[in-house]
Amino acid sequence: MNPVDVMDLVSFDSLLSEEEIALRTTVRDFVDTAIRPNIAEWYDNAVFPLEIVPEMAKLGLLGMHLKGYGCAGRSAVEYGLAGAELEAGDSGLRTFVSVQGSLAMSAIYKWGSEEQKQEWLPQMAAGEAIGCFGLTEPTAGSDPSSMQTFARRDGEDWVLNGAKRWIGLASVAKVAVIWAQTDDGIRGFVVPTDTAGFQATPITGKLSMRASIQCDIELTDVRLPASAMLPEAKGLRGPFSCLNEARYGIIWGAMGAARDSFEAALKYSQERMQFDRPLAGYQLTQQKLADMALEIDKGFLLALQLGRLKDAGKLQHHQISVGKLNNCREAIKIAREARTILGGNGITLDYSPLRHANNLESVRTYEGTDEVHSLILGQQLTGVAAFR
């Protein structure tokens, strides 16, 4: 039995279709061949591997839950299973698929004009154009309604000024979806990144998500035609609908990182000899392994339940918060606990748990902090909004 089979104490695969298992196997094989052999070097050197983007596109991973325009049209569960496998490789690689598909492509797909969809979605699905999603600002994270980026009318054009922060992929993107205040509320704009006045600068010195790109964006008199506005998006409903797509993916992805951490710890404990016995033969180690496996199984069962609800069109907003809050919180605990089994060797890039734990600190923060999701659930339980 391989480590994944050992961890599966509840026969999880019996709940999946043959097609879902086949897709998961395909993505797992891609991770094993294209990501695992290289991820330590990418992470150490803070490099996002652009060369694997065409390979991801060939597997149909970019905008995979969207239909038409060259997208794969996969189910929510299939998207989740793929995300778990990608994040078992590294959170940064799963985040790329999320930013591209769940955020940038979803914004155009849900709220764009037919001309915008035809221009951008086929390119993005094929990996020929990378997209980014500009919502968060230096002083507007959990409260995007306080954003200061402003778009004003100038004749038939729009002129954007402002700043965005922690924007994934912005420095390598061909197109950006930028959210801005207007005299008519918050609106979204499709901005080619070669437009004059658009500048993206990668954020350096990161201790997390090192095999990924996050940027500051400066918008200085960025002039756009009227056709650049997403015509169907008005107010925060537009960006929030995309954030919920990304949050859903995190529910699965975090468990992928947790599972990979468990696998590394289990293998090490079976091979590492101390006091003439393998670490796996000690009661404290077995308790750690059992606790980790239980939480991973529960996390995947939760993800699957939410995925089935999403495919049935019944997933509610607060249920996404249930999954995001629980699975990120538990995944970090698992990655840290797995590191303890590895001892001093666990702080090196020879093993994955501490890398996963560092990455998960970002995953836990973006698309809504623990505090925000706790308040969403608090409002659902009490009927009282405690955000202010």
Image (cartoon, helix red, strand yellow):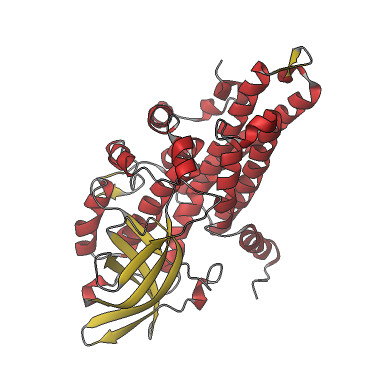
Where is residue 180? Give x, y as percent. 39, 75
The residue sitting at 42% across, 38% down in the picture is 78
State the residue at coordinates (62%, 63%): 372
Find residue 211 and report its horizontal and vertical position in percent: 45, 45
Does residue 82 appear in the picture of this structure? yes
Residue 133 falls left or right of residue 196: right
Q: Is residue 79 left or right of residue 269?
A: left
State left or right for residue 94 relative to residue 61. right
Q: Nearer the viewer, residue 321 or 204?
A: 204
Asked where in the image residue 375 lies, by quadrant, the reply is bottom right
Residue 294 can be seen in this image = no
Residue at point 70%, 30% (across, down): 343
Q: Is residue 259 above or below residue 5?
A: below
Q: What x and y, as percent, mark residue 217?
A: 39, 67
| Residue 41 against residue 181 in the figure, above or below | above
Front residue of 131 and 310: 131
Q: Nearer the viewer, residue 63 or 331?
A: 331
Q: Classify residue 221 by image quadrant.
A: bottom left
